[in-house]
Image (cartoon, rainbow, N blue to C red):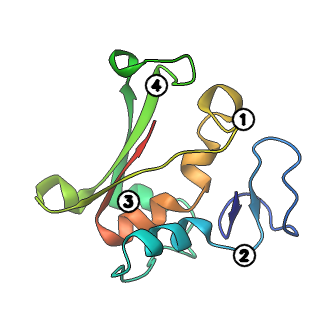
């Protein structure tokens, strides 16, 4: 997953080992969200890695009741911006990771370093990482 946030800066693409992410100046999270939600205002936290923690909560969720396959982990993550705790009209985006980027392989690296949290915190988007 190319990012402009994840890990140390490197040339793209160099995704040959976990966590299969690279900070190579390409904001795939932003490009994806802008494609789906073209009226996004921008990413106010782009240069402030992990500043999303000030603007929302990342919660572990038990998703065992939804398991229909071994491909779904028992634990997922839900990010709720503080602004969405009171607001009724926040968007919801389900973020799917790539192969070998699940929690059992790379922990929360994909969730916290993909760039989605920064965009969500800046644009009132609830994120579900199954």
Identify which residue is drawn at 58% across, 76% down: 47
- From mark 1 to mark 4, how far is it between C-alphas? 16 Å
As drawn, 111 above or below 12: above
Q: Which residue is mark 2?
A: 25
Mark earlier in primary sequence (1, 4) = 4
Name the element at disc 1: loop
Q: In x, y percent, where is residue 27?
A: 62, 72
In depth, the one of 93 and 83 nearer the eye is 93
Query: Which residue, given by chain and number where applicable, does mark 1 sit on?
Result: 100
Q: Residues within 10 Å of mark 3 (few under 14, many from 20)?
A: few
User: In terms of sequence position, does the residue under pointer 4 or pointer 3 come before the other?
Assistant: 3
Residue at 68% x, 59% y: name it: 6
Say left or right for 9 vs 2.
right
In this rendering, position of residue 105 left or right of residue 35: right
Identify which residue, 7 or 96, lies in the foreground. 96
- Label drawn at residue 75: 4
């Amino acid at each position: 997953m190319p990012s402009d946030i994840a890990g140390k800066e490197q040339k793209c693409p160099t995704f040959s080992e976990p966590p299969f992410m690279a900070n190579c100046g390409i904001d795939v999270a932003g490009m994806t969200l802008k494609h789906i939600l073209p009226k996004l205002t921008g990413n106010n936290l782009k240069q402030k890695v992990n500043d999303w923690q000030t603007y929302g909560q990342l919660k572990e969720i038990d998703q065992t009741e939804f398991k229909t396959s071994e491909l779904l982990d028992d634990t997922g993550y839900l990010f709720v911006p503080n602004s969405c705790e009171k607001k009724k009209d926040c968007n919801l985006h389900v973020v799917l990771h790539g192969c070998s980027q699940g929690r059992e392989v790379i922990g929360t690296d994909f969730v916290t370093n993909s760039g989605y949290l920064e965009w969500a915190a800046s644009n009132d988007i609830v994120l579900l990482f199954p």
